[in-house]
Structure formats: C-alpha cells, structure tokens
Image (cartoon, helix red, strand yellow):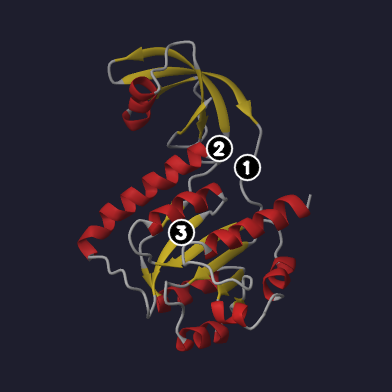
Amino acid sequence: MQRYFYQGPSPSLRSLRMEGDDFHHMANVMRMKPGERIVLVFADGREGVYEISEIKRGYAEVAFVQWIEKNRELPVRVTIASAMLKGDRWEWLIQKGTELGAGSFIPVVTERTVVKLEEKKIPQKIRRWEKIAKEAAEQSERNRIPAVEKPRSFHALVEMSRAFDHRLAAYEEEGRKGESENLLKLFRSVKPSDSLLVLTGPEGGFSKREIETLTEQNFFICGIGPRILRAETAPLYILSNISFYFELMMR
C-alpha cells in the first residue's frame, strides 16, 4: 500500500481529507480510485490503514480501517553531521541515510569544506532536502521523517554535540593506522533510545586542528576499516553497522 506522512498527531476522527502534494500524487500519479487503501503515518509515528471514500476536485476523503502496530525506527537516535558535499552528493546522502534509519541530518562547514552556500539560498535548499527525506522515508516505510537542519560551522557543531549521549567522528588516518576497536567499543556503551552524533568530514578530511578539538571534546575518534571511503559513503557505512549491531545482533 502507498504510504503518506500526515501532518499532525494521530487523529480521533474516523475520516480525513488529503490535500496538496499528497493528494496530487494519489490522484494524478498513482491514479487511485475510491475503495483503494493507503497507509497514513502521523507525527507521533503511528500508522493507520485508510480507505479512499471519495475523490473530489483538489482533495480526497479517506476513512479509517485499522492501526498498524509496527516500529521500523532504529533503536538508537542517530544524527548524521556530515561536511557539506559537492554536487548532488549531499542529497544522495540524505536519501540513502534516511533509508538506513538516520533520525536527522546536519550539514557542517569544516576547514576543508569546498561547498559554500549563499545565505539567501539556504531556506530553498532545506525545503528540497526535506522533500528528499520525506520521499525516502515513505519509500523505506519509516515511521518518522528525518529532520534536516540548517548548515552549521564546525565549532557550532562541537558546541551542540554536548547535548548528545554519545559522539563519534570517523577519521581516515585512524583507519590507515589499523584502529579497529573504537566503533565496537562505542556501540557496547550505547543503550536503546540513546542519542548518537556521527560526524564525518569533507572530501579532504578533517584537519589536524579539528581532530585535536574533537579529541578534547571527548568524541570517539574511529577508524572505519582499512579502505578509504568517499565522504558520502562513510556515514552510510556507520549507519549500516549501527543497524547490524542494534537490529540484528541484539535480537
């Protein structure tokens, strides 16, 4: 069944009205008819099956059928803080990171970040990123849409990192040296529902000064294998390992 995220909390009403982009997709892209069923996902993460009762000009009426009791979210609340990436790589990271369970994304401007966004263009960019996250969350049957935040400087990111239960930074030099224990050591200290900040660098990597700052701020500085990954691949590698450890190994 096609899924849509419905704005607002789980309703007490037995029928709802679908409008806007979701109605357009339902009526004009999927060409749905009365009697067909969809899944609506609400802001609190609950899912309900609804049946289309009427399709009018500009909206559709849908009637409640039943709740779905299933949670597809990672047991750990993961925020991906990645240095801004060139071309469409940041959008690709949002799409794939959403599929892998990331709870939110923060673009970061580091010393070696090449991409520079004009301040006036940031709201438009964020709207596009949010749309990508929403569509990826629907496709991957998530219970929630990841948040996409405005770009932050490296030092602003370090300041806000104190609000997280756990913090890690992937550093290619650790991989070159053969470091292979810190990622697993961190996972063993994380409890379900804890918050975890994952910080990854730009194409040129973190500077020595940035790594010193992260170490002083008690980030786990982790190698992520002997191969050097692209900037957009590193967060996905870590998300995949989080899923394997907390959703498969811990069953």
Q: Quadrant of residue 90?
A: bottom left
Secondary structure of the residue carrying numbered label 2: loop
| Residue nearer the viewer, 160 or 125 | 125
| Residue nearer the viewer, 84 or 147 | 84
Residue at x 56% of width, y 27% of height: 48
Classify residue 41 as left or right of residue 188: left
Q: Is residue 4 above or below residue 225?
A: above
Q: Amino acid at mark 2?
A: Glu
Q: Earlier in the sequence, mark 2 or mark 3?
A: 3
Q: Which numbered dot is residue 108?
A: none
Residue 129 x/y as whole percent: 37, 51
Confirm or deny contact between disc 2 and disc 1 (CB under 8 A): yes
- Mark 2 sits on what residue? 141
| Residue nearer the viewer, 42 or 33 | 33
| Residue nearer the viewer, 211 or 180 | 180
Confirm or deny contact between disc 2 and disc 3 (CB under 8 A): no
- Mark 2–mark 3 Cα distance, whole angstroms, equals 18 Å
Residue 140 x/y as whole percent: 54, 40
Classify residue 53 as left or right of residue 214: left
Residue at x 60% of width, y 62% of height: 238
Q: Earlier in the sequence, mark 2 or mark 1?
A: 1
Secondary structure of the residue carrying numbered label 1: loop
Mark 1 Cα-neighbour bin, 10 Å: few <14, some 14–19, many ≥20: few
Q: Quadrant of residue 18?
A: top left
Q: Tell me the quarter of the image containing the N terminus.
A: top right
- Mark 1 sits on what residue? 72
Residue 33 x/y as whole percent: 42, 12
Residue at x 40% of width, y 12% of height: 54
Q: Earlier in the sequence, mark 1 or mark 3?
A: 1
Q: Amino acid at mark 3?
A: Phe
Q: Which numbered dot is residue 105?
A: 3
Residue 125 x/y as whole percent: 29, 54
